[in-house]
Image (cartoon, grey):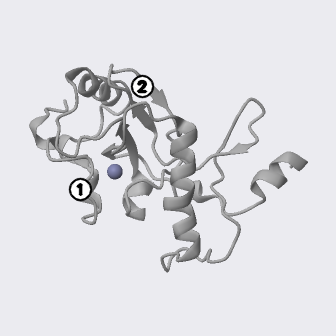
Amino acid sequence: MDEKRVRLGGIGKDWDVERKPIDVIVIHHTKGDSGMTWQRLNAMHLLRLYAKSYFSPSTEKEIQGLPIFSNHFRSNDNTRMVFYAYHWLVREDGTAERLLADNEIGWHAGNWDINCRSVGICLDGNFEHATPPQRMIEGAKKIIQNHYAHVEYACIIPHKNANPKTTCPGEWFHEVKWK
Ligand SMILES: [Zn+2]
């Protein structure tokens, strides 16, 4: 392990050993202005998801007080630790950015069992009370079709079905025919 990696990330648990076959797709929105960058998402998820868990972890995670560690690394030499929790970020024009790899567990659902067996697809914008543009929905459907066609229709769920504490991704979810 090189010095840079130690400085940035230290060492910690490899959460991804708990990865299970993907049989759930969780749809999210950023609930912010469109144009989210992975860097900003990274900072937000470090604070809201990882830091929160490391300060008051659920019982199965004996990590309280330990250095925050995602075991997800990005950059040319694979040394920058990242904390974003989604696998895909879909833009208004339907283009998509790959964030986590499928063998990495995203901390996106607010439910560890679902995290272990799902991918998170996030729509870039606030769709709390608005339906996403059709091109954006088509972009998300294309990801599902190209990468997760085996997932049953009933297992394509809005975030709020995994975690009742959130309204993510808004009220329009069931109007969409996902495949
Ligand atoms: Zn969400």
Q: Residue 126, image x and y in percent?
A: 29, 41
Considering every residue shown, the one lying at the far left of the view is 175
**In this rendering, the label closer to the viewer, 1 or 2:** 1
Q: Is residue 58 left or right of residue 31?
A: right
Q: Secondary structure at mark 2?
A: strand
User: Which quadrant of the structure image shows residue 68?
Assistant: bottom right
Q: CA distance from mark 1 to mark 2?
A: 23 Å
Residue at 50% from the left image edge and 60% from the top image edge: 49
Residue at 32% from the left image edge and 25% from the top image edge: 92
Q: Residue 11, image x and y in percent?
A: 76, 60
Residue that numbered label 2 is attached to: 96
Q: Is residue 167 above or below residue 145?
A: below
User: Which quadrant of the structure image shows residue 29?
Assistant: top left
User: Which quadrant of the structure image shows residue 7?
Assistant: bottom right
Label 1 or label 2, whichever comes before in sequence order: 2
Residue at 49% from the left image edge and 31% from the top image edge: 98
Relative depth, front residue between 84 and 71? 84
Q: Is residue 85 above or below residue 130?
A: below
- Kindly identify which numbered label has been placed on residue 62: none
Q: Residue 170, image x and y in percent?
A: 20, 47
Residue that numbered label 1 is attached to: 167
Q: Callout 1, which amino acid?
A: Thr
Q: Is residue 134 left or right of residue 72?
A: left
